Amino acid sequence: MKIKPEQLASVLRSEDKSLYWITGDEPLLVEESASLAYKRLKEANFTEREIFDVERGFKWEQFNHAVNNLSLFSERKIFDVRLQSSKLDQDTKEAIKTFLKVNSPDLILLIRSPKLESTQLNSKWFKEIISQIVIVQIWPVGRENLSSWLSQRLIKEGINPDIEALRLLTDKVEGNLLAAIQEIEKLKLLANKQGQAINLDANTAMQVIADSSRYNAYNLIDSALLGDSVRSLKILTSLKADGTYPLIILGAITRELRILLPLVKEKDMGKTIDGIIESNRVWFNRKKAVGSLLQRCTTQHLWKMLVRSQKIDQAIKGASSSNPWDELNFLILELCGKNISYQTNVS
């Protein structure tokens, strides 16, 4: 049974399952769902909890021993298993299936893990157990939904932001929900001074909010694929200011171009964009970005950018008099779909 995080509370009340699996790559939202599950289960008299941090080399015998050695007088218990990887080895699968066979109303297995891919969820092993478990799928909050997410969080804490304050906060914490929560906590302190809900304007927000933006090369790439040149150059400037070595950025870009090349070739051959995205199993949260690139690019465009990437590589390594950051600006603009004509001087 697959559910969304907002369905978890009602499912915990209505379903009689012994395994709840929270999966996703957004740590804050995974932790919040796990905390909600623990709270509801505690209300149902699951008063004991044993935590297992599953890292490389973990021995599942520890878990099996804990499950099989409960006395008749033990309290209702939660086994809190925290997987560091979503790749499940045979020992992990066997331990989970063995737990499900126990099928005790007094035992709950709560698993949290990085995102499970669709290939895993559609595997024979998962299909055998899916009717016995609840999978809570956590999706990242995309840039287009971040403002709404922040607004709901602020209002919940008694803070009513105006449009400009919300825009400012969104820009500052983009891509970092943990940072967003930290900033909301600061704003809560401001609200609590007055003991009632406050209206938050941009001037007040500027005084309270720290610059929590944390960009990386992959934010940059997705922004460029979407054709957002203003945001892309902002991210590139931030990376430069943070001291990021330009070869790291260039390597991420060229890797992406090579991955996209066969997809663009399929488009040039007449295949539909939806069909290409589906057959190549593009991740859900990247479909929009990849689809945008496919709509406007040909293989000739990609090869042109790869050739220019080689020249930028030479500039970074000192084999050219060109400024690599200037050249990266031009490359990003071209990836955004801007028609840029420039030359890279190679000695």
Image (spheres, rainbow, N blue to C red):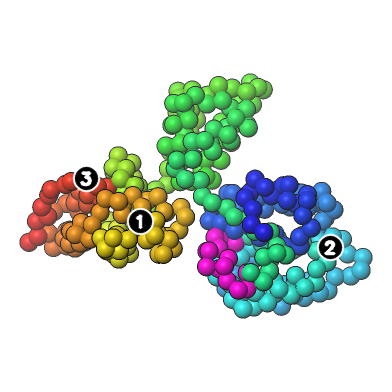
Query: Is residue 63 rendered to the left or right of residue 242?
Result: right
Picture residue at 69% right of the left edge, 71% below the top: 96
Q: Quadrant of residue 112?
A: bottom right
Secondary structure under the numbered disc 1 in the rendered image: helix
Number of the label disc, if any, that sits on residue 105: 2
Amino acid at pointer 3 = Lys
Q: Earlier in the sequence, mark 2 or mark 1?
A: 2
In what quadrant of the picture does the C terminus appear? bottom left
- Farthest right residue? 73
Percent across and percent down for residue 329 are 23, 48
Frontmost residue, 143 versus 171? 143
Frontmost residue, 327 versus 90? 90
Residue 115: in magenta span: yes
Frontmost residue, 240 versus 105? 105
Percent across and percent down for residue 291 are 36, 52
Number of the label disc, if any, that sits on residue 338: 3
Residue hosting label 1: 273
Picture residue at 70% right of the left edge, 64% below the top: 131
Percent across and percent down for residue 22 are 63, 57
Residue span colored magenta: 113-126
Picture residue at 87% right of the left edge, 61% below the top: 75
Residue 4: in magenta span: no
Q: Is residue 66 visible?
A: no
Q: Is residue 63 above or below residue 152?
A: below
Secondary structure under the numbered disc 3 in the rendered image: loop
Observer-side mark, 2 or 1, equals: 1
Q: Quadrant of residue 129?
A: bottom right
Secondary structure under the numbered disc 2 in the rendered image: loop
Q: Earlier in the sequence, mark 3 or mark 1?
A: 1
